[in-house]
Image: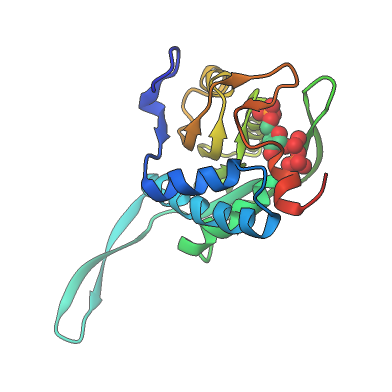
Amino acid sequence: MSKPDIDYSRVTVVDHPVVARDLTILRDKQTPPQLFRLALRRIGIILAYHSLKALPTQEIEVETPIKKAGGHEFATNVVAVPIIRAGLGLVDAVTTFIPEAQIGHLGMYRDENTHQPVDYYSNLPSGLEKAMVLIVDPMLATGGSACDSISFVKEKGAKDIHFMCLISAPEGINRLQREHPEVPIVTAAIDDHLNEQAFIVPGLGDAGDRYFGTD
Ligand code: PRP
């Protein structure tokens, strides 16, 4: 169901039976890490497929065994930027399609009391200004981590920035669209709201803990 105050022209909510089934597996608190990882990988591939739709191409010519044929190659590099930790689970999804993609890392965790993102690590490749930069994180809750990450890659020169997440809260989408309106979002679900601890409701709990088997 569509939510008020969301600019749907800048959000793709992927609606697909295999996504719906995998989302259910991910939400289920009984799902063990080994199955959680597999479901996240499958959904990630579909989200990456949709996110990469914006990748510019240029025409080239190849020789088939029969004759010359028109084809396409990517016109820019792709830099995938997982927000550590949980975003690491979505990197494979991007490299499934773009094995040559560069991977930047942004380490960020949310302070449990203030709910503000705390940066603890960054390592980004050079040349961001010419690349399609795809920031990946399973959860978009308050939007603090996503917005800080986007600001960070902008400071490093990135211009073509995209954000891909599994589950988002309306609050996070609103904030991201307010602070970075030009950044397209691809997500598998927009959930109901955030609770007092700023957890997405119904959500799936802490994606990092569930993916890595920590608590
Ligand atoms: C989670 C999630 C996002 C962030 C979303 O990370 O993976 O990075 O919170 O919340 P926000 O939109 O309110 O910023 P977490 O802090 O649990 O760190 P982890 O990935 O290391 O578990």
Dividing the image into 4 quarters, which one contains the N terminus? top left
What residue do we see at 17% from left, 77% from top?
A: 68
| Viewer-closest of 194 and 90 | 194
Q: Is residue 150 above or below residue 196?
A: below
Q: Residue furthest front?
A: 30
Rendering quarter of residue 66: bottom left
Q: Is residue 202 left or right of residue 205?
A: left
What residue do we see at 55% from left, 39% from top?
A: 165
Q: Is residue 143 above or below residue 17?
A: above
Q: Position of residue 65 (x, y in %)?
A: 20, 87
Q: Position of residue 83 (x, y in %)?
A: 68, 43
Q: Is residue 37 visible?
A: yes
| Viewer-closest of 178 and 63 | 178
Q: Is residue 165 above or below residue 105?
A: above
What residue do we see at 38% from left, 44% from top?
A: 54
Rendering quarter of residue 102: bottom right
Q: Is residue 107 visible?
A: no
Q: Position of residue 84 (x, y in %)?
A: 73, 46
What residue do we see at 48% from left, 55% from top?
A: 45
Q: Position of residue 76 (x, y in %)?
A: 44, 53
* Quarter holding ligand 1: top right
Q: Is residue 213 above or below residue 143?
A: below
